[in-house]
Image (cartoon, rainbow, N blue to C red):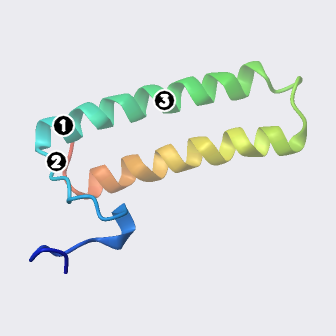
Amino acid sequence: MHNGMVVDVRTGGAPPITSSPPTLVCIRAELETARKLLNGLSFAAYDKLDGAEMYDLGAAEGLVAGALKKLDAAGVTS
């Protein structure tokens, strides 16, 4: 507790941020765009990158896909 407030150490003591559904819809749209861009980069760079770099692109795309699945589970649609 800090001055009567609960401090969330995961956010470095910053106050919690509440998101409204329209904000989450915007985030979803941005994540969908990011996933498409990463997918396009993966195909364009397939013969130019080594295995580790391709793995990094695939991992980034997987993280975005995971975030989209969480939004799906929460009922946030675009």
Please state which amino acid type lies under the numbered disc 1: Thr
Mark nearer the viewer, 3 or 2: 2
Q: What whole-number distance in Å separates the C-alpha atoms at marks 3 and 2?
A: 20 Å
| Identity of the residue drawn at 60% across and 29% down | 38
Mark 1 crowdedness (10 Å alpha carbons): few <14, some 14-19, many ≥20: few
Please state which amino acid type lies under the numbered disc 2: Ser
- Label 3 secondary element: helix
Residue 33 appears at what percent x and percent y?
43, 25
The label shown at residue 34 is 3
Please state which amino acid type lies under the numbered disc 3: Ala
Q: Is label 1 in contact with label 2 (beta carbons under 8 Å)?
A: yes
Q: Quadrant of the C terminus?
A: top left
Query: Label 2, on which residue?
Result: 19
Q: Earlier in the sequence, mark 3 or mark 2?
A: 2
Q: Earlier in the sequence, mark 1 or mark 3?
A: 1
Query: Label 1, on which residue?
Result: 23
Q: Is residue 78 visible?
A: no
- Label 1 secondary element: helix
Q: Nearer the viewer, residue 26 or 35?
A: 26
Mark 3 crowdedness (10 Å alpha carbons): few <14, some 14-19, many ≥20: some
Q: What whole-number distance in Å separates the C-alpha atoms at marks 1 and 3?
A: 17 Å
Q: Residue furthest front?
A: 3
